[in-house]
Image (cartoon, rainbow, N blue to C red):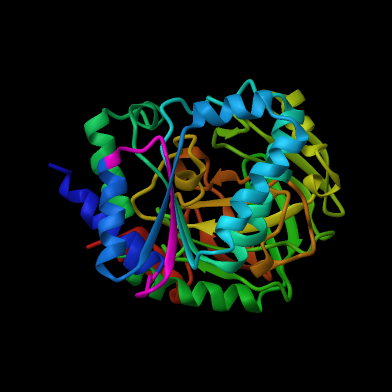
């Protein structure tokens, strides 16, 4: 008998996140996923009259394909995946992974081929721009270890955060979007951080469970050449299978001119991937009340209540500052008292201090207002 929480989560993904309608086609990509949950998704899609396509994928198999793949092979896979994506109206990507470092030994040149020839044609060019999509991780003992929880405790946390009242959150975030749309100058202040940039005339976007689960952020992008100063990130991050701690970036006229971390060589290899990788494509404020500490999983960490993330690399078309790159690396800065606090200023007005919104129109985004 399947876990009843599977049915509740499948309902959220199909009916809220994708808002699937009768006759629409949805692609379900299941990475290292229990068959019982894939079946729950199929049943939820069928219940509304949708047409499910299913692709079962393995991170270990994909690793071998990348290690052995040629440019022609990667391009062929990308073309096939792009053709399939062009035939669907919605996409659900559920990504389990028994080993979060499965791709850590894939050489950078192979990873770049994968990103540009395999992943980008189907996902960045089609899925992100032309479908209603949602992506999420799947709980595993590996994730529980990252979160420093027992497996059972982590599963309870996972289903609680993934099935929260996202409609309520959506209403609460509208004033923040409106404020960001009116804002020109942003300043971030925290231990090791004093960063200034403009977001003038770049749209802000609410993330309320319609694209990622879990969710809880509003994002925009800095004016490409406006970023000045230093930012010191305090959440560990994994990119291309490599773990980084204490990333510090120094910006001049929008460009990263100095970058260090616990793996400075790999950090700079990524930032040297292409011209756009040293510029920033996203600035976001996170506020999911159930997520309070980092666990080296970016779909969770970028939503931490009291956090921001700043993203070297590609900008989203919905909040476009013109920066293009194969890289999109969300780096997270917590600004809560436990890690030294921090402040966010919009046009010299303090809007959040030590992780809490301090102006009346944004108080509904503080944790106690988002949960019963």
Which quadrant would residue 23 be assigned to in this image? bottom left
Residue 288 falls within the magenta-colored stretch: no
Q: Residue at x 45, y 77 (%)?
A: 361
Query: Farthest residue in the left direction?
Result: 1
> Residue 3, how many percent across, how many down?
17, 44
Q: Residue at x 65, y 29 (%)?
A: 66
Query: Position of 223 compared to 231: left or right?
Result: right
Report the number of discs: 0
Up/down of 66 relative to 210, above or below:
above
Q: Nearer the viewer, residue 147 or 30?
A: 30
Quarter of the image where the C terminus is located: bottom left
Q: Nearer the viewer, residue 23 or 100?
A: 23
> Residue 178, how many percent across, how many down?
56, 78
> Residue 168, how many percent across, how many down?
33, 71
Q: Nearer the viewer, residue 132 or 5?
A: 132
Residue 22 falls within the magenta-colored stretch: yes
Q: Residue at x 75, y 60 (%)?
A: 197
Up/down of 276 relative to 129, above or below:
above
Q: Is residue 34 visible?
A: yes
Q: Which portion, as a residue range, is magenta?
A: 19-35
């Amino acid at each position: 008998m399947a876990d009843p929480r599977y049915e509740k989560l499948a309902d959220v993904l199909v009916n809220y996140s994708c808002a699937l309608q009768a006759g629409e086609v949805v692609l379900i990509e299941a990475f290292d996923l229990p068959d019982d949950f894939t079946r729950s998704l199929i049943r939820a899609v069928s219940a509304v009259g949708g047409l499910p396509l299913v692709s079962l994928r393995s991170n270990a198999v994909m690793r071998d394909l990348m290690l052995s793949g040629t440019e022609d092979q990667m391009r062929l896979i990308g073309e096939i995946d792009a053709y399939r994506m062009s035939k669907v109206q919605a996409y659900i990507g559920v990504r389990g992974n028994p080993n979060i470092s499965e791709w850590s030994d894939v050489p950078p040149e192979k990873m770049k081929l994968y990103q540009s020839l395999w992943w980008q044609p189907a996902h960045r060019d089609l899925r992100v721009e032309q479908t209603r999509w949602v992506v999420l991780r799947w709980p595993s003992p590996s994730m529980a270890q990252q979160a420093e929880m027992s497996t059972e405790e982590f599963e309870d946390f996972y289903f609680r955060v993934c099935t929260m009242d996202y409609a309520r959150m959506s209403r609460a975030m509208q004033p923040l979007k409106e404020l960001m749309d009116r804002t020109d100058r942003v300043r971030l202040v925290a231990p090791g951080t004093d960063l200034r940039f403009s977001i003038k005339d770049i749209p802000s976007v609410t993330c309320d469970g319609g694209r990622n689960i879990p969710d809880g952020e509003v994002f925009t992008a800095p004016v490409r050449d406006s970023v000045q100063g230093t930012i010191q990130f305090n959440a560990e991050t994994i990119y291309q299978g490599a773990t980084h701690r204490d990333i510090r970036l120094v910006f001049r006229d929008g460009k990263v001119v100095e970058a260090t971390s616990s793996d400075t060589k790999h950090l700079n290899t990524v930032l040297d991937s292409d011209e756009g990788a040293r510029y920033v494509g996203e600035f976001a404020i996170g506020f999911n009340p159930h997520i309070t500490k980092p666990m080296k999983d970016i779909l969770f960490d970028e939503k931490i209540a009291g956090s921001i993330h700043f993203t070297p690399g590609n900008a989203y078309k919905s909040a476009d500052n013109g920066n293009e790159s194969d890289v999109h690396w969300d780096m997270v800065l917590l600004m809560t008292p436990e890690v030294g606090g921090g402040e966010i200023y919009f046009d010299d007005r303090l809007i959040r201090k030590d992780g809490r919104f301090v102006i009346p129109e944004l108080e509904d985004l503080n944790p106690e207002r988002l949960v019963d």
